[in-house]
Image: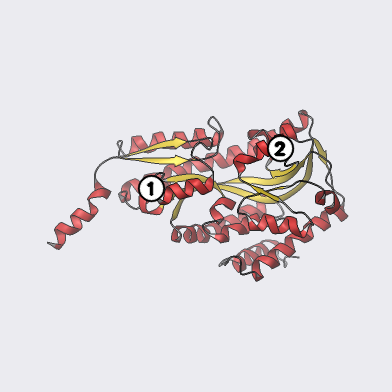
Amino acid sequence: MKSILLALLLLPALSGAVTLKIATVAPDGTGWMKEMRAAGDRIKAQTDGRVKIKFYPGGVMGDYATVMRKMRIGQLHGGAFTSGELATRYPDLFLYNTPFLFADDEEVEYVRQRLEPMLNAGLEEKGIVVLGSASGGFVYLFSDKPVRTFDDLSRAKVWTPEGDPVSDKAFRLAGVTPIPLTLADVYTALQTGMLDTVVNTTFGAIAFQWHTKMRYMVDFPIAYVFGAFGLDKRTFYKLSEEDQAVLRQEFAVAFKAIEETNRQDAVGARAALINQGIEVLELSEEQRAQFNSLGSEVLDYMGSTDDFTLTHLGDLIRIIEEYRGSPIQ
């Protein structure tokens, strides 16, 4: 009798086809979508049609909060998210968003190789299995008016991602009362004048057409962002182990390609912004030091506040200091 019951419990994982419904704000036709669709085709072929993937690009399923809610009730099975969006489920991912923390791409890569397995495990405990992630690069400040100092920033109408306490705290420390909005609402807010200052990667500013409302870019990286593809844990573990392995393999391949494409796009996007009239503002050493001081203040805040619990803050600091061979200033 026990063996019969066990067979019945395993039946959904061993037979029948499933269509995984995946949502993202990434516009169709972008490198992200091309690689994810290609991964979906390979998965369908390698599982003999047992696993099919249907994508909903361009934010048609709503913002990230809506997508996560639909994942919880089974209307969607997964999505592509930014680190900040995933951090609303697992706050340790806010560590990547700490402003003025990372020095360059090489340092980020060193940290990611050591920290990311811990973060992925923590996120899985919260119900999301990460099947692939890729660097989005550093974000920069784009504005309609020149911004070089805290005083300049305090007069700006600045966007922060909705539900991101790290960005909110950083701007407030700089004397700014930011305007929190979802990603999908930013362009309209720029059109109406509700916003005149935003942060994004060079490629993201173009992809979402924000650059058409901007005149300046501050040539000083603010924070690092990454994107990840996450599948609902319950859905993932209903698949056979064989099919789980196929998904892990093919999305790893896809996101490796996305990572390389993102790096190439960042270089091309910067040149495109300049060609389209965006003026690049250089900061003095004094101005850079003023902004850098925010990073230490935010890091101290994250370690002392009860607003969210961070399991791996100490690991992050240890890894960075290990890479630099000196304490974080």
Residue 228 visible to the viewer: no
Q: Quadrant of the C terminus?
A: bottom right
> Which residue lies at the image location 76% right of the left edge and 41% below the top edge?
196
| Label 2 CA crowd tier, 10 Å (few <14, some 14–19, many 20+) | many
Counting from the top left corner in percent of width and height, residue 259 is at 57, 42
**Mark 1 belongs to which amino acid?**
Gly
> Which residue lies at the image location 25% right of the left edge and 49% below the top edge?
12
Q: Name above or below for residue 242 compared with residue 191.
A: below
Q: Do labels 2 and 1 touch, CB within 8 Å? A: no
| Left-right relation of 293 to 130 | right
Q: Which mark is residue 115?
A: none
Counting from the top left corner in percent of width and height, residue 37 is at 45, 34
Residue 147 visible to the viewer: yes
Q: Which mark is residue 190?
A: 2
Quote the CA–CA distance across marks 2 and 1.
34 Å
| Label 1 CA crowd tier, 10 Å (few <14, some 14–19, many 20+) | some
Instruction: Please give the residue where the numbered disc 1 appears in the rendered image.
Output: 74
Q: Earlier in the sequence, mark 2 or mark 1?
A: 1
Counting from the top left corner in percent of width and height, residue 264 is at 64, 36
